[in-house]
Image: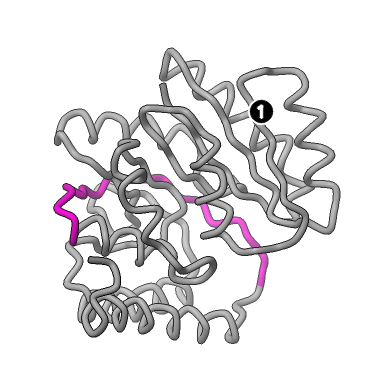
Amino acid sequence: MISVIIPAYNEEKNIRDVLNVTAKTLDGIVGEWEIVLVDDGSKDLTLAIAKEFAALDGRIKVLSYGRNRGKGFALKYSFERSSGDLVAFMDADLDLHPKNLATLLEVMEKEKADVVVGSKRHPRSKINYPLKRRLMSDVYYLIVKILFNLNVRDTQVGLKLFRREVLRDIMPRLLVKRYAFDVELLANAVRRGYKIVEAPIELDYRSSSNINWAEIWRMFVDTLAVAYRMYLRGYYD
């Protein structure tokens, strides 16, 4: 069984399509599944629309906790309330079509991997992505490479697949609730000896949101904090 966890914040325009497309896709690629949609304190109708859709299919769970706490918190909260042997994290904007999950499942089985990360830098990936975001992604990759020596070229793509036991081991150790959650999770997975493999994706960037420089700065600070806890304090050990 696979649990697909989808954190959502102010996605009222997309959420019905996301749930519909994801459910239909999962029906075509796996036998047993659940979708866990967590509303991260949206101020629009995301929660109401998701609940309305979930009422039509018992395999869709909708969670909420009232106020915005960040993607990291949303993923931890949802994982604790999921039940799949495999757990996928997927963004709620459909930039990455759920059909990409089939590729991640294939790579996990073929490579006997514990974690599979969708990667824009995989040579077989097909991406439509703004140049400015590519440059920012390149800079962040270099920072992560220097700090953690991760053999992962793209930590931030919103599509990842885990064996449940990996998350059961690592999730209680994590502190980042917002900006560097992915790096904290993957760096600890490597440190704990789990096998991480990258997989090709098809990405069609559709978001019109502007880059928030304050959030970029907070992500950089969070990333440094992860390195401090890992190497100077030995917190994760």
Whether the magenta-drawn stretch holds residue 16 is answered as: no
In percent of width and height, residue 76 lies at 50, 51
Measured as percent of width and height from the top left, residue 47 is found at: 79, 43
Q: Nearer the viewer, residue 24 or 131?
A: 24
Q: Locate residue 99 relative to residue 213 in the image: left or right.
A: left
Relative to 170, say whether 87 is above or below: above
Q: Is residue 34 left or right of residue 87?
A: right
Task: Identify the element where label 1 is drawn.
Answer: helix
Residue type, label 1: Asn
**Residue at 78% from the left image edge and 46% from the top image edge:** 46
Q: Position of residue 78 (x, y in %)?
A: 56, 43
Q: Residue at x 46, y 57 (%)?
A: 128
Figure quadrant of the N terminus: top left
* Magenta residue span: 191-209
The residue under the point 45% across, 67% down is: 175
Q: Which residue is mark 1?
A: 20
Looking at the image, is 46 positioned above or below residue 206? above
**Label 1 environment density (alpha carbons within 10 Å; few <14, some 14–19, many ≥20):** few
Q: Quadrant of residue 62?
A: top right
Quarter in which the C terminus is drawn? bottom left
Q: Position of residue 147 (x, y in %)?
A: 23, 80
Which of the 4 image quarters holds residue 100? Answer: top left
Q: Is residue 192 magenta?
A: yes
Relative to 209, is 236 on the left or the right?
Answer: left
Of the pair 128 and 94, the residue shown nearer to us = 94
Q: Is residue 60 above or below residue 38?
A: above
Measuring 33% from the left and 41% from the top, which residue is drawn there?
162
